Each structure stands twice: as C-alpha cells, then as structure tokens.
Amino acid sequence: MRVLLVEDDPMIGESIRKGLRHEGYVIDWVQDGRAAEIAIENEPYALVLLDLGLPRKDGFAVLASIRGRKVRVPVLILTARDAISDRVKGLDSGADDYLVKPFDLDELAARMRAVQRRHAGRAEPVVVHGALALNPVTHEVRHRGQLVPVSAREFALLQALLECPGAVLSRTQLEERLYGWGEEVASNSVEVHVHNLRKKLGEGVIRTVRGIGYSITSERA
Amino acid sequence: MSIRKNLLLALLSTLLLLGLATSAATYFAARREANELFDYQLRQMALSLRDQTLQSQNTFYPGFDYDFIVQVWNPGGSLVYLSNQNILLPQSKFGFNTVAVNGEDWRIFTMNNDGKIVQVALPLSLRSDRAAAIALRILIPIVASIPLFALLIWLLVGWGLEPLGSIARAIAKRAPSSLQPLPEQGLPDEVQPMVAQLNSFLARLAEAIETQRRFTADAAHELRTPLAALQLQLQVLERAQTLEDRSDALAQLKAGVRRAHRMVEQLLTLARLEPEAAQTEVTPVRLDRLAAESVAEIEPLAAAKPVEMRLGRMEPVIIPGREKALRALLDNLVENAIRYTPSGGRVIVDACADAEGPLLAVTDNGPGIPAEERERVFDRFYRLPGSAAPGSGLGLAIVKNIADSHGAKVDLAEGVGGVGLTVRVRFPTGQSVPGNSSPGEQA
C-alpha cells in the first residue's frame, strides 16, 4: 500500500518510514504542506499521515484544501498538539483519526489498518473475497483455507485489486499503488507479479482485461 | 506603629492640654470678672449710702449682706457709723485698697461723700471663695465636654480610617491565587495612589507568571518532538533484522538522544538566564579571551564536519558583563554557525571595537537567513522552514535574552560576499549594564 508521510522533523520521518516499511507499506515522504498538496493531487495514496506543524502550509490548511477538492483519501493526523480543541478541529476538518506524539509504532500501524478498513467499508480485519482471504496484520494470504506464501509486492498487488473487487486497474495504476518515488520499476514488473500470483493461487484468480488492465475474479470458496 | 493610635494619642493629649489651658484661663478670667463685680458692688453700695442718714449698730438695709463692713467718718474725722461693732478697719485712701487687718485681708472702698468719708469693705477670703465658686461653675461645661470630645475624636478617627480597613478586608476576601486588580473607584485620595501602584504591581506579576507559564507549556510541547523521535527510533531498532539495519537504527537512536539532550540543555539555559542574571555580579570581561576560549572548546565539533574555525579581528576589548552568560551567548552563536554551515565551510569569530562600540561577530558561509525571516528567528522554538540540521530553535532566543540583559543589540546580515550569515552583537559604549555598579573600561 502506498502511503504519503507528511512530517517536517527528519528523525521522526525517517523512523516512521523505516518502521512502516517493515509493515509492508511503501512510503513517500514530504516535509512541507505545499509539497503534500502537490503529491496528493498527483498520486493515488491509500492513506496520508499528516503532521500539523508544517512549514509553508499548515497541516490544517492542507486538510481543508484536499477535502475541499473532494479528495477522499483517508487522513491520519500525527501531531504534538494534544489540546482537545485541536483534536476536535482535526477530526471535524475531515481527518479520519488523530494520534498525539509521542506514539507507539504498533499503535500507528493498527490505526492505519483500522482507517483503511473503514474506508473500504469492511468490518472484519481480514479481507475475504471468494476463495481468497488476506490478513493485513499478518500479511498472510489463504486460498481455500490454505496458507500461500507471497512476497510483499504480491500482497500489495492483491490488496490493490481487492480494494474495489471486480474493478479493473491498469498497469500504470497498479504501478502507482505499488511503487514509491524513489523506486525503480521495470516495465514488466506488474506482469511478473501477476504471473507469479497465478502460479501460486491458480490461473483464475486474476482476470486480464485486454488493453485495460487487471481485475480480481470471484471464485467460489 | 499605628496611625489610629498615633492620631488618637496626639488628638486626645492635645484636647487634654487645650482643655486644661482653657480651663485655667477661664478660671482666672472668671475670678477676675467676679472680683470686678464685687468691686463694682462695693462702690455702688458706697454710693447708695450717700443719701442715707445712718444709724449705728443695726443692720438697716433689708437684704443687706452682713458680711460687708460699712464705716462713715464725718468731715472732722470721727467715726459716726460702724456696721459691725466687732470689726474696725482703718481709714484707707480713696478708691479701692486691699488692707491686711489682724491677719485678714480686706478689700476696702473709700469715698468722699459730701464731706463725709464712706468706707465699704469685704473680707478678701469671702470674695475669693465666691469668685472661685463662680469660676468653677463656669468650668463645668468645659470639663464635661472633654470626655465627649474625646469620644467624638475616637469615633471620627475610626470613621476616617475606615477605608483602609475595608480595603484590607476586600483583599483578604479574594482567592489566594487571584491577581485581579483591586477596585479603584470610590477610594479616598490618599489611598488611591497606593492602590493604583499595587494594581500595576499585580499586573506586572501576572504578566511575569504568564510568561513563565507559557514558557513551560511551550517547552513541554516542544519536547514532544524529540521524545517521539526517540520512541520511534527505539521501536525501529527493535524490529531491525540484519546487522546493518541494527547498527543503522542504533546510530539514529544515538543521534536522537543527543538531540533531546541538547534541547533540554537549551531549555535549562533559557530558564536560568533571568534568575542567574539577578544573582550574578557584573565584572569586566575580556571579549577576545572569551571568544578564543569558546572557539577552542568547540574545535572538535568543527573538525568533525569539517568546518574551518578562525579567530578574525581580535582586540583586547573589555566590557562590563556577566562572564558565564556572555560565554553562553558566544557558544550558541558559534555552535549555530558550525551546525548550519556545510562541510568544508568556514566560520570566523571577531571580538573588537569599532566606531559604534564593542562588538562580537560570528560569520559563516552557510545558507544564511533570508531577510524576511530575520525577525522571527529570535522567537523561541522557531526554526527556519526547510532547515536540514536538527536544532532546538532556542539558540537565538538565548542569544537575544543575554544580549538584552547586557543592553546589547543583535543584528543579522549577509556574510562575506553576500553569502552566509553574520551575527553581530553590539554592546553599549561605557554605559552601565543593568544591575552593574562599576562602569566598564574600553581598551
């Protein structure tokens, strides 16, 4: 999952990026409000981690601007401001959650998952579709109950296709969701991942729509 | 000491003295008046006898007070009338006389009455007794009024001092932590200035407390960032799998601890500046020696980057100041310069005096501070947007605080060739530093 981290403190930003990479996230990191706006406008993020005390444009202003443009991406505020008025303002301005620094990395990851769950309209933590079951916490994939080992990118690809089951995502769209700014993407990376997944889970799990992209199919469990 | 007691003591003793003086004066005046009245009476009596044919030995005028002695001599000199056979007075000169006869004083009035000599007399003791009685009776209202006046004075003093009492009660009723101003309406003229001063003092106190509170709140808030970083860095370390990841994470954690440590040190320095300034003595300080010491101590930090450190213009300038604080000022400026100058850069420190006075300057060739930010950088916890080097945001706030307490001005400008930053601290010429008693000398 591709996440935008907006944090101006270099040490905090670095630690969050490293910590969340362990959780399988792909992190793009910006350090001021204007850069955040531009990034959100141009890339599809699954989630935004937003600090409030930012140079060039304050976190609240960024939030107001993206919600004003009807951008639906889930936003989790990370800040040192703990006053009740700030929390209320943050949530009422359109944030989906509000975490006060210092916070625990595990709690951050759990809240990120919760926000994503709600955003996808799911109640259960495990994403179930037909014969597939994806556990975002453990990064386990079960096919017909059997545990199937998959790589981080493969998991991310399945997650992306399962965000809106049946919807078709193009190669470019999948690349945007799987790879961050700093990462080299070979032109056939997505194809390779799809191929590997079909090998592990069966040919029918992912459908190719010629000229458009890929989608997940509804297999019977 | 009590205003009320002093006032009462003064007023009541004055009242008493005045009362006594008045009583004495009244007494003597009354007695004299009485005596004059008696004399008048004697004379009138003598005059009234002029037309009478006198018979001896009997009391003849009804209502005539038998204390009087009436004697009449005929022109030949023989006594033809004597009112009291037992008392015989010598003939006195005409008019009023006081004569002692047989050990008793008599007041005698003698006059010529158609050739006869008429003499009327009264014992002085009787007169003075009566005069005293009259005088004393006159004194009664005066003396009686003294305790009344005393009571009145007591009540009026109490009433006059009442506003002070009511203010004291009003203050006592307030909450212990309340610093609200006291009401100034309806106060007597004498008390009003005192209450006004008290209110201005309360306002200053409230402001000082508020400044402290804001500092503490700001500090607590700002400490969250380095602490949050530490927490995250620790958790990243915990999750590190490979040796390389682990040593990376450890290095990050160390840097984080250093940063947190530095911020706490800066906060403590800032918090201590005012109380220490109040307690530390002002002495003559050699700026060039101070600069040399500061540069020498920071040399390892500079060498590590590496950043070249140089002493520029050094003159034996002496200013009155607090050495420890001035050293902290220099350390902060030099450290800032090193921190924000990239490796290979250069920092120059000057300690000299020019036409405008003693001067400390630190120049670097780093990124500098844009003109529009130069006001704000002195704010506590303010960091330049986009500054890469980790800092507390307190360095310049500390520098400004110390400069202010020495009456010095800090200004920011470009460095050499329009590149980098020069920070100049300009000290006053030969003036006293606040809190100083001895003037400084200049080399």
Image (tube, coloured by chain):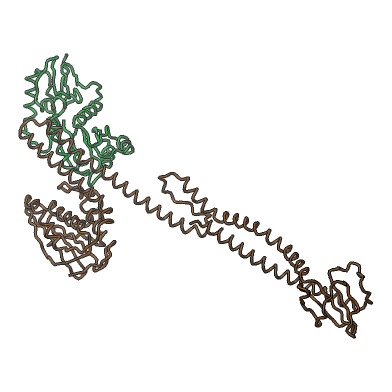
Chain colours: A green, B brown
To which quarter of the image does residue A66 belong?
top left
Quadrant the C terminus of chain B occupies: bottom left
Q: Is residue B300 above or below residue A47?
A: below
Q: Nearer the viewer, residue B185 or A91?
A: B185
How many dots with numbers? 0
Q: Nearer the viewer, residue A30 or B366?
A: B366
Q: Is residue B233 above or below residue B154?
A: above
Residue at 44%, 44% (x, y): give it: B175
Residue B418 seen from this side: no
Q: Nearer the viewer, residue A11 or B302?
A: B302
To which quarter of the image does residue B246 belong?
top left
Residue A138 seen from this side: yes
Return the x and y of residue A6 as percentages of the image width and height: 20, 39
Residue at 15%, 18% (x, y): give it: A132
Residue at 69%, 62% (x, y): give it: B142
Return the x and y of residue B220 as percentages of the image width and height: 26, 42
Left of B201 or right of it: where is A161?
Answer: left
Left of A210 or right of it: where is B85?
Answer: right
Return the x and y of residue B266 as percentages of the image width and height: 21, 49
To which quarter of the image does residue B436 belong?
bottom left
Return the x and y of residue B275 as percentages of the image width and height: 28, 53
Left of B135 or right of it: where is B248?
Answer: left
